[in-house]
Amino acid sequence: MAIRIDGKALAAKVKARTAAEAAKLPRQAGLAVILVGENPASKVYVAGKEKDCAECGIRSFPHKLPAETTQEELLALIEKLNNDPDVDGILCQLPLPEHLDEEAVIHAIRPDKDVDCFHPFNVGRMVIGRPVFLPCTPAGVMEMLREYDIPVRGKRCVVLGRSNIVGKPMGMLLTQADGTVTICHSRTEDLASITRQADILVSAIGKTRFVTADMVKEGAVVIDVAMNRDENGKLCGDVDFAAVEPRASYITPVPGGVGPMTRAMLMENILTAAKNHLGL
Ligand code: NAP
């Protein structure tokens, strides 16, 4: 039976570490959070981030804008926050309402305040192995592997999903940790034959019970990034947890796995931004 990786406990540890460091700064670190519209999931995520900031002694500056906010208004706010010395990080909660251009918004956030690590400058820095920030979700997965002494060097790693936010950077960080990485996607042929080779399998697809026991090698480490709702509206991942758990050596639950780690790594990025702004 697999060891369950406790993302909640580890996130608490990361946040405590961040809070201790943040308390030593000559001024409080600050995060501006922009929420446009009334997306219920986004509201929950934003509330969570504000709570995390409070726990870590980080100031949060909420900007809740109506759904009909124009592109010009949003960009003007970002420009103002770019120039605000109390703001170390700027986070614009995605997805944005249809009429707004997400890419333009990502590009408008100054790279030194891009604590989500979405700006092409920061993505490029990560790819060449000289990151300023690391993208929160993949960084949270790497932190879990480190904490549980799970070796990556020389291991076969398979990542399911190739999004810019999760799959691609996940593959990059595993490669930089000396894993041998295959990234799979919706056009991958004979997916199960690839996943069965994985020593470390990371799933970030967004389909409930997609990863079944026959897709997993005996003793594999299984990391479930997804946050889906099952037929009863219950939060769940991509992995058929009950069936896969007996085959795996380590496994992350959903909820209580990667989700809390993503939030904790955001706090670390804000601390990094503040230290950089303070020249520390
Ligand atoms: P996304 O942008 O929708 O990407 C999904 C990826 O899965 C795509 O690359 C897609 O391939 C691939 N895919 C879809 N169907 C597939 C199939 N049948 N076989 C193989 N690959 C398939 O999603 P995302 O933003 O990366 O998020 C993925 C999941 O992680 C979601 O459940 C999301 O809620 C969750 N998430 C969790 C956290 C967290 O903190 N835990 C953070 C971010 C996201 P194509 O590229 O070919 O379309």
Image: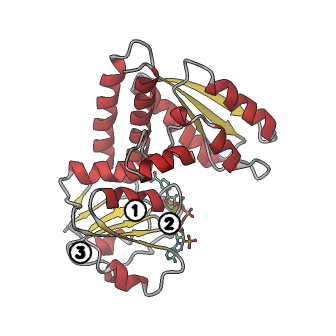
Q: In the image, is residue 214 above or below residue 274?
A: below
Sort mark 1 into few (<14), some (14-19) or many (20+) by Cα contacts within 10 Å. many
State whether label 2 is within 8 Å of ligand 1: yes
Q: Which mark is residue 211?
A: none
- The answer to which of marks 2 and 3 sits earlier in the sequence is 2
Quadrant of the image containing the C terminus? top left
Q: Which mark is residue 162?
A: 2
Q: In the image, is residue 241 above or below residue 268?
A: below
User: What residue would you read off at disc 3?
Assistant: 247
Per the image, label 1 sits on a secondary structure element best described as helix
Per the image, label 3 sits on a secondary structure element best described as loop
User: What residue would you read off at disc 1?
Assistant: 171
| Three-letter amino acid code of the residue under disc 3 | Arg
Sort mark 2 into few (<14), some (14-19) or many (20+) by Cα contacts within 10 Å. some
The alpha-carbon separation of the residues under discs 3 and 1 comes to: 23 Å
Residue 228 image point, x, y percent: 51, 62
